[in-house]
Amino acid sequence: MSRENSPVLRSAGVYGQALGNGGGRLIDAASGLNGADMYVALYECTPYDLKVAPMIVPRLSINLRSVAVSGALGGARVRDYAGKRQSLFFTPAHTEAAWLKRAPSRHLNIYFHPRMLEEAADGDRGAMRLDRPLFDVQLPALRPWIDALELSIARAEPYAEDASMGLAHLILATLARRPDRALPGLAPGVLNRVQDYVAAHLHAPITVADLAAAAGLAPSRFALQFNAATGSTPHRYVLCRRIERAQQLLRDGRPNTAEVAIDCGFSSQQHMTSAMRRLAGVTPGQVRRTATRETSATRMAPAWPLRKEPAALVAQAEFEQNAAD
């Protein structure tokens, strides 16, 4: 499906035009292949009186600033909402909306094909259902994912778009399932298959959709089950494997650091250096110099251990490092 024919992107266009007419603007966005299944957009707005026509696909809106809002869906009675940071508003497909904000605001919208929620739910009935709107809902379990998504979507760092899509998948999958039902992780055989895929493709881009296909699961469901099995987002897992491979090549005496970066799937030597410094606490030069000082008896010393950090802190560190670079 071309981008022009994507109902997800057409719906995002309808919203963007309405918001632009009210003084808002699109800051950045991320999408899957051709925008066919999901599109995530970050908006900044002046005070507005917004009217949005019905859209083909549903959308989840996430407040990023605490701003009171009044409004309604489908011509219902107008109500007032606190609109605190990270509050959720869900608009089903084919539903008109009217919102009034009296202060500047910032929010994320996740536009998605309905089948994504159905696949993630797998028969379950969570907080978000396709036929039922949500107003001013807050879920503490989503806070780290929202924090990380807010930071990743505005980054220019390579692979940031896939990180944003992975986080959006996690948010949708969490909302699709009942909070009192534990989600099993990936079966050992499936996890091994995914890990083998990553190891074989570290030289190339690896998306959440690629890993989900290797696991035989829908992307949103895969992202949630992968996190349950490993305690990591797919994007972070792949990044850690790239760093480990790079450290091994540097210790083995590969002379060209830029070639090591490309062979491990980094877009540049600078990208590899930034990621390695943040997650391992060392630079490629330090890895190479330490390997040179080792005797033959200790030449196989292990790589520097990778740091374990909550998703939101990882995204914050990436954002700050890219700004410094």
Image (cartoon, rainbow, N blue to C red):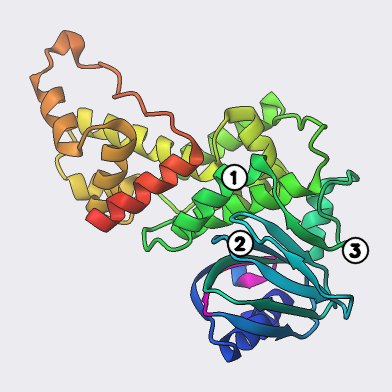
Residue 319 part of the magenta segment: no
**What residue would you read off at disc 2?**
63
Q: Comparing marks 3 and 2, which lies closer to the viewer?
A: 2
Q: CA distance from mark 3 to mark 1?
A: 24 Å
Considering the image in quadrants, where does the N terminus appear?
bottom right
In the rendered picture of this protein, how many numbered marks are placed on residues? 3
Considering the image in quadrants, where does the C terminus appear?
bottom left
Q: CA distance from mark 3 to mark 2?
A: 21 Å
Q: Residue 288, percent across and down?
A: 15, 31
Which residue is painted at 63% across and 71% down in the image? 35
Would you identify the image quadrant in which residue 12 lies? bottom right
Label 3 vs 1, first from the N-terminus: 3
Of all residues, the one furthest to the top in this rendering is 297
Q: Amino acid at mark 1?
A: Arg
Q: Which residues are magenta?
A: 35-46
In the displayed structure, would residue 238 be above or below residue 180?
below
**What residue would you read off at disc 3?**
131
Asked which secondary structure carries label 2, the reply is: strand
314 or 210, which lies in front? Answer: 314
Q: Does any portion of residue 113 appear in the rendered image?
A: no
Q: Amino acid at mark 2?
A: Asn
103 or 13, which lies in front? Answer: 103
